[in-house]
Image (cartoon, rainbow, N blue to C red):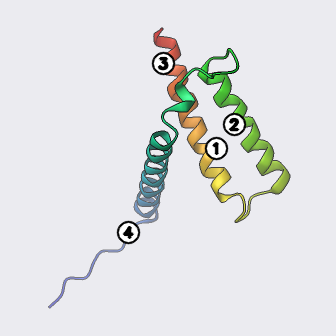
Amino acid sequence: MRKSKKALTKNQEMTLRIRSECDRIKELLVQKNTDYNNSLHSPPLLFDMDPATGIKARINDKRNRIRQVGLNDKTEDTVDDLIGYLVHLQIANKLNSKQ
């Protein structure tokens, strides 16, 4: 006799979805940070600005793209990028407050 799996509650199911999505974003951020050689947290070569200012500019660009194009399959990666930039902004702010 096989034991049947107990159905998940809606809260448990949502918890699993949140964890899965956060894991996916985490892996994306780690890969992009490696691919771009930590460029978001390095001083820019042409302009004198702190990393948080540069990240905010990128957030604004992504926000404008979503506003102009809308949320659809063409902007799915834009949403991922926006989430990533917000995480990087949080990190930059924490690093800045330690200095």
**At label 4, which amino acid type do we have?**
Leu
Q: Is residue 96 left or right of residue 67?
A: left
Residue on which the image places disc 3: 95
Callout 3: few (<14), some (14-19), or many (20+) C-alpha neighbours within 10 Å? few
Mark carried by residue 82: 1
Mark carried by residue 8: 4
Q: Is residue 91 left or right of residue 59?
A: left
For marks 2 and 4, the one nearer the N-term is 4
Q: Are marks 2 and 1 in contact (CB under 8 Å)?
A: yes
Q: Could you give the CA–CA distance between mark 2 and mark 1, rounded to whole angstroms?
A: 6 Å
Q: Could you give the CA–CA distance between mark 2 and mark 4, rounded to whole angstroms?
A: 36 Å
Q: Could you give the CA–CA distance between mark 4 and mark 1, rounded to whole angstroms?
A: 31 Å
Rendered location of residue 26, percent (x, y): 45, 47
**At label 3, which amino acid type do we have?**
Leu
Q: Residue furthest bottom?
A: 1
Q: In terms of secondary structure, where does tag 1 sit?
A: helix
Work out whether 98 lies above or below 91: above
Q: From the image, which quarter does the N terminus lie in?
A: bottom left
**At label 1, which amino acid type do we have?**
Leu
User: Residue visible at 61% across and 46% down?
Assistant: 81
Q: Nearer the viewer, residue 46 or 63?
A: 46
Mark carried by residue 59: 2
